[in-house]
Amino acid sequence: MISKIRWICLLNLALCLFTLFVLTDPLYVINHEATQIAAHLVRGEGFTGSGGLQIRNAPSAIIQPLYPALLAVMLWLFKVPGAFLALRLLQSVLSVLLCRLIYLIARELVPENTALLAALFYAVYFPFIYTTTIIWDTMLFSLLVAAAVYLTLKYDGRRRRWPLLLGLTLGLLGLTNAVGLIIVPIILGWLWLKYKEGGYRTVLKLGLVLGLTVILIAPWSIRNIMLFKAFVPVRTGFWGILYLVNNEDATGTMLLLHQGKRTRDVNEGVTLHYRPLIGELADLNEEQQEQYFKRKFLSYVAAHPVRFGKMLAVKMYYYLWINPYDPVQPAWLLQYFLLLLLGVIGGYWAVKERRDFSLFFWLFGAFLLVYTVMGPLYNWKYRLPVEPYLIILAAYGLSTVIPAVRSMIREARLSLTRP
């Protein structure tokens, strides 16, 4: 007989495939940094692209190598447009794996039925379902984050392969998305505080995890350092993004205003703002562009410290709720609102009942800090990797609300029958 979790995973797969083949174009070919680099890899031109500003083709470190390399394999095997279909199908499989992982993570912390409820919440959550059709690293990154969380919760100090598995997972995180690097100190710090009584054995195991993570990322870092003759450990674009969300036209998102007015779309705003800068940027490589934007960002902050502070608050709000410059489906918004409400309830009861959801709270805090500074350029892409833990808290919240409501109903009925 098929278990409940398998039925839930099959439901998620069915919804992903329905969305892919009925609601979207499964063969749609998109052009952005990752697809450009993948195409150049297949043509033997190396890890090259035109960077975030699409000025000229050159050696690039604008994004991490794992997802473009995966897309390059698909292009080599299936050509265009078959590669885009193949990758979207693969991402549907990744979604099923993430559904299973959410169940396994929840089962470490809550009863079986609540873990199944968390998996069901994920299985029908539209933003994740739709993201399987998007050619970007979000699904892969979310799965790797979940794998790291699961391995962290399974730590008991006895498994010999544990440092290898966690170090490998964290290394792949760093090669998928730069934000993955903030997870490394979060996980190592959480484990140390929880198991520090293990003494040197704990230190040794955590040191092995860190060492393996560094070893995996090091070849990419060395390549960048040699290429740009500067310290670029994971990617370029840090200062460029900071300037994007901190300038006279900034909204804290990907959309830029023009002369104080909203532009028609993202492309128009970016074009109107950056066109006057092209002459200064055209002959600079990505690292030199970084230094250019670093100077502009620091000059802007020095001249407008109050606006910079206000924009931090705006970006925090957009990350927690909704960026109004990016289209939002009402059904998505309703689902997220319910998850947020139930997640807050679940977090309250977790603290009250002293259930150890602390790793989730550490992750929420770390991602909120990153995107308060860097800006939630789009609505879902940057919050989705931590939403599985909101989903688990929401399931726990609902599992506490239902008995409380039933108890209230019983009390009300009893009070009505008393003389």
Image (spheres, grey):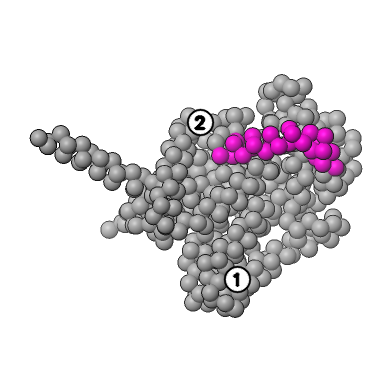
In the image: residue 195, left or right of residue 176:
left
Residue assigned mark 2 = 329
Which badge, 2 or 1, comes first in the chain's sequence? 1
How many other residues sit within 10 Å of disc 1, few (<14), some (14-19) or many (≥20)? many
Q: Quadrant of the C terminus?
A: top left
Of residues 291 and 5, the one drawn nearer to the viewer in this rendering:
291
| Residue at position x 77%, y 50% in the image | 236
Q: Amino acid at mark 1?
A: Leu
Instruction: Residue at the far left: name it.
Output: 419
Q: Amino acid at mark 2?
A: Gln
Give the residues in magenta. 295-320
Name the disc covering residue 206, or none: 1
Q: Is residue 312 magenta?
A: yes
In the image, residue 419 sits, relative to residue 236, either above or below, namely above
How many labels were placed on the picture?
Answer: 2
**Measured from the top left, where is residue 221 in percent x and y?**
76, 61
In the image: residue 232, left or right of residue 281:
left
| Residue at position x 34%, y 47% in the image | 400
- Does residue 108 show up? yes
| Residue at position x 24%, y 43% in the image | 407
Name the disc covering residue 26, or none: none
**Measured from the top left, where is residue 113 in percent x and y?**
32, 53
Q: Quadrant of the N terminus?
A: bottom left
**Measured from the top left, where is residue 406 in percent x and y?**
25, 42
* SS at mark 2 in the image: loop
| Residue at position x 54%, y 45% in the image | 384
